[in-house]
Image (spheres, grey):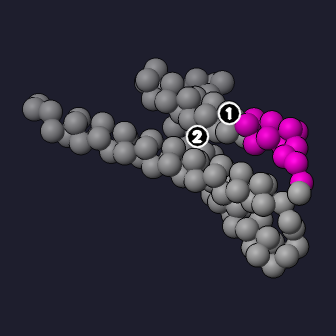
Amino acid sequence: MKTIETSGLMAMRQDVIAQNDALKKTALAGVTGGVTNSQPAFGAAMNAAFNQVNNMQHAAGDITQDYTMGKTTDIAGVMMARQKSSLGFELTLQVRNKLLKAYQDIMSMPV
């Protein structure tokens, strides 16, 4: 049985932290009301976050397929990749829900 590599776990942790930082930058850009030279536009930041989640899901699908075909035997790596892609999707879904709720609240305000 293979042991879980600490470096692999740390790399996955760094990926999740990087995604969280990208979403924080996106939220800060919306709160400050403008775009500065150091921060990307809201749409570009959201697009980058969506692409990152998409890449995680594709990687999880690829490693799952490799496991089912017998190309790899690292079940812990497969489960970690699937969990990471699941968390990324859930985070994206929650951000979408918050943005939609904020839009609905603004649209329901009397003028």
Q: Quadrant of the N terminus?
A: bottom right
Instruction: Name the foreground residue: 47 vs 72.
Output: 72
Amino acid found under the numbered disc labelled 1: Ile
Q: Is residue 40 above or below residue 65?
A: above
Circle 2 SS class: helix
* Residue 4 makes an appearance in the image: yes
Q: In which quarter of the image is the C terminus?
A: top left
User: Which residue occupies the foreground of this view, 65 or 42?
Assistant: 65
Residue 64 horizontal/vertical position (percent): 73, 68
69 vs 78: above or below: below
Q: Which residue lies furthest to the bottom in this view?
A: 69
- The residue pinned by badge 2 equals 45
At which x and y percent is residue 53?
A: 62, 52
* Residue in front for this viewpoint, 18 or 4: 4
Q: With 56 as the anchor, is 45 left or right in this view?
A: left
Name the residue: 45% across, 29% down: 30
| Residue stretch rendered in magenta on the structure | 2-14
Q: Is the magenta stretch mostly helix, strand or loop?
A: helix
Q: Which image quadrant is residue 101 in?
A: top left
Front position in the image: 77 or 52: 77
Residue 22 within the segment the image draws in magenta: no
Residue annotated with mark 1: 17
Q: Mark 2 vs mark 1: give the one in front.
A: 1
What's the residue at 89%, 54% (across, down)?
2
Amino acid type at circle 2 is Ala
Residue at figure coordinates x 54%, y 52% from the top left: 89
Q: Quadrant of residue 41?
A: top right
Question: Element under label 1?
Answer: helix
Label of residue 86 in the image: none
